[in-house]
Amino acid sequence: MLGVNGTPFQPATLQLTGIPGMQTGHAWVALIFCILYLISIIGNLSILTLVVQEPALHQPMYCFLSMLSLNDLGVSLSTLPTVLATFCFNHRHIGFDACLVQMFFIHTFSFMESGILLAMSFDRFVAICDPLRYATVLTNSRILVMGLGILTKSFITLFPFPFLVKRLPFCKGKVLHHSYCLHPDLMRVACGDTHVNNIYGLFVVIFTYGVDSAFILLSYALILRAVLAIASQEQRLKAFNTCMSHICAVLAFYVPIITVSMIHRFWKSAPPVVHVMMSNVYLFVPPMLNPIIYSVKTKEIRRGILKVLYKSQS
């Protein structure tokens, strides 16, 4: 469809959707989302504050944890404006360009999280398989380079997405299926030739999630081999325990992604509410769970929290 000046038609605004089939009860949904945001933001800010203030946490493992917390804050803040506007104020419209910006940041932070989890798996691999060289391999400068590399890779691979979407006409309506903007959702209402978008989207997914998850699995296969070679069962359990927080974080991130992909590929007739809820799990659960996982499973983080609480009581 062409506009008055012969250019591809693009709506000035797009309409966001809450949860399909839930015309009532949005107040409860809004309350749940507010609680999730509070847990995520307070939890990740607390992790960042602890790592900065506690000298005992100035180690490579906690530098990567800081990156993860900072990235999770980015995920939460990217979706927060439109989600709260939709559920709390019933404001369901977003400007087309603002939607593209939100889409870019949501996907960029999501892909960055995958890269950070890969870097954390490398940290655990060096700590267990080559502990004597841990401090010399993971220096501050190398950690900084790894962080900048993850940021650069995600930014460059996602940068074309807004331009690929903007070139398309939108003639299948302007109602999106979520309370935020995602690339697959925009493709549903776009018309014209979307093959480039779909092919490039598949390439980016394989290049990020596929490659990162493969290397994470490889690192844990090598870790498992090294741990099983340890004679003492107590030392084996201790080595495994240092990986449990990261394993839980990886599962919290990748299980929803795999589930969403499986539903999209093999259960096309699934009710819209299933797709929406799984996408919400994929975006909201990892940023909320990660601070809880590391607070519960990591002794140094627990000590830092107790130390801060003791100081505040004193």
Image: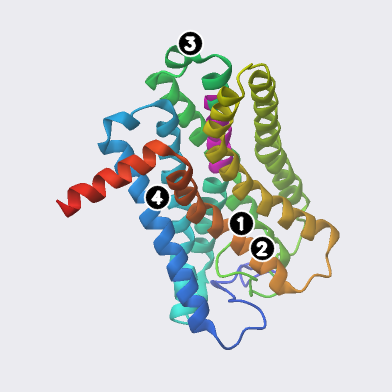
> Is mark 1 in CB contact (under 8 Å) with mark 4?
no
Report the Cα–Cα distance between label 3 and label 4. Answer: 31 Å
Residue at image position (39%, 53%) is: 43
Q: Are marks 3 and 2 in contact (CB under 8 Å)?
A: no
Q: Earlier in the sequence, mark 2 or mark 4?
A: 4
Give the label, 3 or 2, closer to the camera. Answer: 3
Quadrant assignment for the N terminus = bottom right
- First along the sequence among labels 3 and 1: 3
Q: Position of residue 92 (x, y in %)?
A: 52, 77
Q: Please tell me whether mark 3 or mark 1 is closer to you in this view.
A: 3
Task: Tell me the SS state at disc 1.
Answer: helix
Cα distance in 3D space between marks 1 and 2: 6 Å
Q: Which residue is mark 2?
A: 278
What whole-number distance in Å separates the C-alpha atoms at marks 3 and 2?
43 Å
Residue at screen point 54% across, 46% down: 108
Could you tell me which secondary element the residue under label 2 belongs to? Answer: helix
Q: Amino acid at mark 2?
A: Met
Circle 3 residue: 132
Give above or below for 65 relative to 226.
below
**Which residues fall within the magenta stretch?**
112-123
- Specify the principal SS of the magenta part: helix
**Pointer 1 residue:** 282
Inter-mark Cα distance, 3 to 1: 37 Å
Residue drawn at (27%, 35%), measured in percent from left and top? 54
Q: Residues within 10 Å of mark 4 (few under 14, many from 20)?
A: many
Where 241 sits versus 22, above or below? above
Left or right, 55 with respect to 211, comes to left
Find out whether residue 93 is within the magenta segment: no
Confirm or deny contact between disc 2 and disc 4 (CB under 8 A).
Answer: no
Secondary structure state at the residue bearing disc 3: helix
Q: Which residue is mark 4?
A: 44
Which residue is at a point 47% across and 64% down the rendered structure image? 36
